[in-house]
Image (cartoon, rainbow, N blue to C red):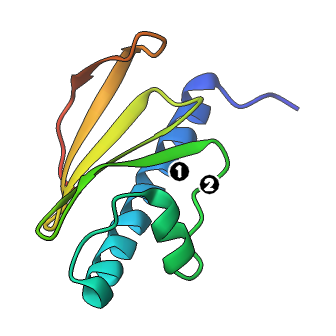
Amino acid sequence: MTSCPANYRKKSYNAAAYSDLGDACACQEAYYADNETYADLIDILIEDCSGFQPSKNVVIYVVSADESHYKMEAYHVKGNFLYEVTGPNGTLIKYEWKNQMKGARRPVGGRF
């Protein structure tokens, strides 16, 4: 059996982070509907939003949140992209990680 090429694996890791971030956005909107503010911790969304649980090795965190907006980021530990979303309205920026250890990144564009 041949192993899956590394670039396909990275694509699946990146897709998991992207998908989980989309689910987190939906949870932010549900949380806002109940609380009239956005959640400032991902743990609040995991607890509050039934069925939401980030995939294995996907890291999602809330960068900022208040009564009018939120900003979250997500990545898979084995992926090569970091996704940043600002909501509401879901403006997404996709960053390619040139050097994950130093956190260097450059935008490659996109919308959620």
Q: Position of residue 7 (x, y in %)?
A: 55, 26
Q: Nearer the viewer, residue 1 or 58?
A: 58
Amino acid identity at mark 2 = Ser
Left or right of residue 34, residue 91 in this image: left
Of circles 1 and 2, the one toward us is 2
At horizontal 53% and vertical 50% (from top left) the residue drawn is: 16
Vertically, is 68 above or below 106? below
Q: CA distance from mark 1 to mark 2?
A: 7 Å
Would you place residue 88 above or below residue 79 in this image? below
Three-letter code for the amino acid on which mark 1 is drawn: Ala
Q: Residues within 10 Å of mark 1 (few under 14, many from 20)?
A: many
Question: The C terminus is located in which quarter?
Answer: bottom left
Q: Quadrant of residue 36?
A: bottom left
Q: Position of residue 84 (x, y in %)?
A: 28, 44
Above or below 28: residue 9 = above
In the rendered image, which residue does mark 1 sit on? 16
Using the image as rendered, state which of residue 74 and residue 11 is in the foreground.
74
Image mark for residue 6: none
Q: Quadrant of the N terminus?
A: top right
Q: In percent of the image, x 67 and y 49: which residue is there?
A: 56
Q: Residues within 10 Å of mark 2 (few under 14, many from 20)?
A: some
User: Measuring 21% from the left and 30% from the top, which residue is drawn there?
Assistant: 108
Whether the residues at callouts 1 and 2 have beta carbons within 8 Å, the answer is yes
User: Which residue does the numbered mark 2 point to in the structure image?
Assistant: 55
Q: Position of residue 8 (x, y in %)?
A: 57, 34
